[in-house]
Amino acid sequence: MNVTVHPDELRRYGSAILSAAGLPEPDADIVAGSLVDANLRGTDSHGVSRIPIYVERIRRGIVEPHPQIRVISESGGALIVDGGNGMGAVVTSKAMEIALDRLGKQRSISVAIRNSNHYASGSYYAKPALARGAATFLYSNAPATMSPWGGSRRFLGTNPYTFAIPAGRYGSLVLDMATSVVARGKIIQAAQRGESIPAGWAVDAEGRPTTDPQAALEGSVIPFGGPKGYGIAMMVEVMAGVLTGANIGPDVGDLYENLQQPQNVGAFLQVLDISAFLPHEQFVARIEEFIEALKATGTGSSEVLFPGELEARNVEARRTRGITISPDVVAALAQVAPSGLPTPTGMENSDKSEEVS
């Protein structure tokens, strides 16, 4: 039976597990915070279910728990950051910190990130920039799980991208998505639970449509929008992989299947001072007017949502009601938790309430 956990309790629990595995406490808290944030937004495939594989990679020495994250090149507002094979959340958070530190001197900062690892959900890293009234564009490559359009074997990752724009009284516009029809994490979850997946998500190793998650994991996910999604995935690969000096395509280490070598994931981060183009008050007034007009196109039976609005509602609801965790995730976390670590009290209570969807 599903259980419900308060997000703060879940973050402390996840942080303690990661710290026991070898991460310094501040870094463990960053990683746990990024995962719980995904759960809060409703992106459970990128939430605390990832902690066990993170722990496995740390214990095997595939990830550096004490990375030397450093700027290896800087020219004006263009920087290259080497992540020292650190945890993706730690490296990307540091890259954002570096970018914001320079945003006062430059009106636009671009950071090429190499030698990093899986960072879960990109929207988490945009928060500090949004608090500064700045816009964020973040691209990441990923292990090859998707065939190019017309191709017969895996070559590209699900290659997510994140756009985050401050939006006045509407909070923020946040588009955070993979270039596949569905995030591969959802297929992994289905396989773990013994559930089928919807048609149209993936093909098997022979290129045939499948609803079997295990066959899908051995095959390829499908790009959203056919050749359009494939085209965007390729451009993200160029920005996050080719341009940054990180691994590219099939050379990016698989998070689950390759337990022998680092991933060397790449990311490309841009932070933009909006006031360089419009006075802040004018921009806020214009975007509020734009969103208001957009939402007014809805009908009595349908509501128009802007990107990130549904996730913001999920956050509000889950902060109040707690985060629902499935039994398989509870068990997986318990297996990697250090002996004697108290289990969050919420994990002892069943929850039959519906989530915001």
Image (tube, rainbow, N blue to C red):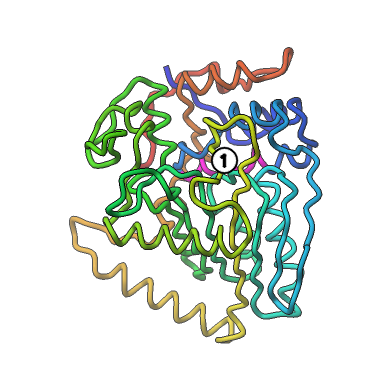
| Disc 1 packing (10 Å; few <14; some 14–19; many ≥20) | many
Residue 277, placed above or below residue 305: below
Closest to the observer, 282 or 269: 269
Q: Amino acid at mark 1?
A: Gly
Closest to the observer, 353 or 194: 194
Secondary structure that dominates the magenta span: helix
Q: Which residue is mark 1?
A: 253
Magenta stretch: give its range: 31-41
Residue visible at 45% across and 64% down in the picture = 235
Residue visible at 64% across and 26% down in the picture = 56
**Residue 349 painted magenta:** no
Q: Quadrant of the C terminus?
A: top left
Quadrant in the rendering for residue 50: top right
Closest to the observer, 97 or 130: 97
Closest to the observer, 161 or 80: 80
SS category of the residue bearing label 1? loop
**Residue 32 painted magenta:** yes
